[in-house]
Image (spheres, grey):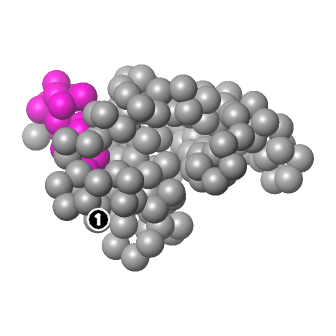
């Protein structure tokens, strides 16, 4: 097996750091849901309470504050696609993951839509209620066809 190139190693490291940022952002948004604490308060607490080594802290902060700041717009974009249940019926973890992914789809064109959806699905499998990953996947696929229409069309 060939040794990964420096560029491949750099991409893998970034992917791992971003995965951790999404994980912590999900936890931070869950805390926001429960307590109403603002992003800077949550981030300060997380830096004390968790080992955030290997986490893209700038990305974590962008996701946490960006989702808080634009949550209504994100929910407005999600709502027409949640056929079988309303967003209010979603558990806080699933809702946080949906918001993170839609934030990325709208604001982070550097993140391929499939990566954003896959990350949300994998975190839902690990932390969400049973079968929430199916709901997350279906809903985000629909949103991606609107928000990233050209990218989705190019992949098909």
Can residue 63 be seen here? The reply is yes
Indicate left or right for 147 with 5 as reference: left
- Rendering coords of residue 109 (x, y %): 38, 23
Q: Nearer the viewer, residue 4 or 79?
A: 79
Foreground residue among 115 and 27 = 27
Residue sticking out furthest to the right? 48
Number of marks drawn: 1
Magenta span main SS = helix
Q: Position of residue 56 (x, y in %)?
A: 67, 36
In the shown orientation, is residue 45 left or right of residue 32? Answer: right
User: In x, y percent, where is residue 95?
Assistant: 44, 52
Q: Residue at x 19, y 61 (%)?
A: 84
Helix, strand or loop status at disc 1: helix
Tell me where residue 12 sits by quadrant.
top right
Name the outermost residue toward the bottom: 130
**Callout 1: 10 Å neighbours few (<14), some, many (20+)?**
few
Per the image, is 153 magenta? yes
Which residue, given by chain and number where applicable, does mark 1 sit on? 134
The residue that appears at 23% across and 51% down in the rendered structure is 82
Choose top left, top right, bottom left or bottom right for residue 153. Answer: top left
Name the residue at 10% across, 40% down.
156
Residue span colored magenta: 139-155
Left or right of 139? Residue 38 is right
One can see residue 111 in this view: no
How far across and how far down the image is residue 73, in percent?
A: 37, 28
Q: Quadrant of residue 47?
A: top right
Compare residues 84 and 61 and report the one nearer the observer.
Answer: 84
Q: Is residue 113 magenta?
A: no
- Depth order, front residue of 135/12: 135
Q: Residue at x 78, y 36 (%)?
A: 41
Against 56, residue 82 (above or below) is below
User: In the rendered image of this protein, does residue 2 appear above or below residue 76?
Assistant: below
């Amino acid at each position: 097996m060939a040794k990964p190139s420096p560029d491949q190693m750099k991409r893998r490291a970034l992917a791992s750091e971003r995965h951790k940022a999404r994980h912590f952002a999900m936890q931070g948004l869950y805390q926001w849901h429960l307590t109403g604490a603002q992003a800077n308060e949550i981030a300060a607490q997380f830096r004390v309470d968790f080992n955030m080594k290997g986490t893209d802290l700038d990305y974590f902060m962008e996701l946490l504050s960006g989702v808080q700041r634009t949550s209504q717009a994100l929910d407005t974009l999600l709502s027409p696609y949640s056929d079988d249940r309303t967003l209010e019926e979603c558990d806080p973890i699933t809702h946080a993951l949906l918001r993170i992914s839609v934030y990325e789809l709208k604001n982070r064109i550097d993140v391929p839509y499939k990566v954003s959806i896959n990350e949300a699905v994998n975190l839902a499998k690990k932390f969400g209620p049973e079968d929430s990953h199916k709901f997350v996947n279906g809903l985000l696929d629909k949103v991606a066809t609107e928000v990233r229409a050209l990218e989705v069309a190019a992949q098909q």
